[in-house]
Image (cartoon, grey):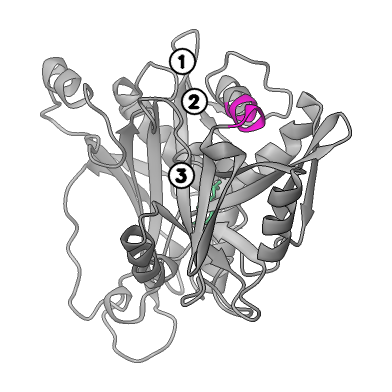
Amino acid sequence: MSSDPGFVLKPTSTPLPAAERAKLMKDLGFGRVFTEHMVTIPYRAPDGWGPGLLSPYAPISLDPAASVLHYGQAIFEGFKAYRQPDGGIATFRPAANGQRFNNSAARLAMPALPVERFVEAADLLIRHEHEWVPPNAGESLYLRPLMIATEAALGVRPAKEYLFLLFGSPSGAYFPQGVKPLTVWLSKEYVRAAPGGTGEAKCAGNYAASLIAQQQALEAGCQQVVWLDSVHKRFVEEMGGMNLFFVYKDGGRSRLVTPKLTGTLLPGITRDSLLTIAADLGYIGEEATISIDDWERDLKSGVLTEVFACGTAAVITPVGEVKFDGGSWLVNNGQTGPVAQRLRDALLAIQHGSAPDAHGFMHRVL
Ligand SMILES: *Cc1c(COP(=O)(O)O)cnc(C)c1O
């Protein structure tokens, strides 16, 4: 392979005073505060990826004919850097995000970025922004890599020029008042993904297409939408931008079941990590097909004890109630269940370095 063109460093000459930063970090929500630098890497066919650049966080300029604005070649990722007990910093499974980024790129006919460069870009940014990694449990520096097609050309074909960007956003505990179960809306009108479509890719367009169903969910008094399969509108796929888990009583143990990856689900890294750590906690973890009829029947019979969603941003969010056109079901009496709570605590403990990292999930940066 060609040699790595590396990164050029042009950090800001006017860093934010510590007091200003402290003020911004006082009330962290999600995705509202951005740090002082960003990393960009340009791509141009046939030469490939050029040198990366670390520069002050700033608006970018695009030609109005840039193909991302017309035909939507845009993908993104999301992962987090956590403060460790010794004051250092580690990211959670960044190479898995790099690999998924490339899978998304392939689906949208965009070029792959070597996973090592993806991880290196994040390490470089974090080293410059280490003071923006908040110290408390549940807090982190959220990293947002993305790639867009920048070539000015209106012909419909894969662009020949792209830009990789990466920036960071310190994020607070997603639920500062503790984990509160959500009410979710079963969408039978809209679908997120169809076989052969882009459901497996983390592409911007999937989100654009989901917003109207999310609006309907809000109008129905729910916080999130549950996506069903596009063909039968019966099989459960995901919740908003998170994967779902169903907790069953199985003798004395709990069985964690998550919908199978059929090609229309986004393969979540939190989902995969929970399947991995389930066994450590004495649970059975498995993938299966779950229909809304199963959901209702198993709630009524009492074998389905909890339902929760998982993803990088919120880690684990319990589902307390399910609403649909014509009715609703309560899950675990609308309360956070013990399995969801225990998994959440276990995952956060690994991420914050307060529990052993038996599966090599953590990538030490500083
Ligand atoms: C990103 C995403 C997830 C969660 O993936 P994680 O890697 O766990 O953050 C789930 N569903 C959709 C649709 C997503 O975009």
Q: Marks 2 and 1, Cα distance to the nearest angstrom?
A: 8 Å
Labels in figure, total: 3
Residue reaching furthest to the right: 251
Q: Amino acid at mark 3?
A: Leu
Between residue 68 and residue 304, name the one nearer to us.
Answer: 304
Q: Earlier in the sequence, mark 3 or mark 1?
A: 1
- Mark 1 and ligand 1: say if the CB distance to the nearest ligand atom is below 8 Å: no
Amino acid on which disc 1 is placed: Gly
Which residue is painted at 67% across and 39% down in the image?
A: 273
Task: Please tell me which residue is depicted at 15% across the width and 21% down the height of the picture.
Answer: 23
Q: Earlier in the sequence, mark 2 or mark 1?
A: 1
- Which image quarter holds the N terminus? bottom right
Label 2 packing within 10 angstroms: few (<14), some (14-19), many (20+): some
> x%, y% of residue 280?
78, 26
Q: Which residues are magenta?
A: 337-344
- Per the model, the C-alpha gap separating discs 3 and 2 is 34 Å
Q: Which residue is mark 2?
A: 365
How far apart are labels 3 and 1 at the CA level? 34 Å
Q: Which residue is mark 3?
A: 182
User: Which mark is drawn over residue 289?
Assistant: none
Circle 2 SS class? loop
Q: Main secondary structure of the magenta part?
A: helix
Q: Residue 15 appears at what percent x and percent y? A: 15, 26
Q: Which mark is residue 88?
A: 1
Amino acid type, residue under disc 2 in the picture: Val
> In the image shown, does 104 or 191 lie closer to the viewer?
191
Q: Quadrant of residue 43?
A: bottom left
- The secondary element bearing badge 3 is classed as strand
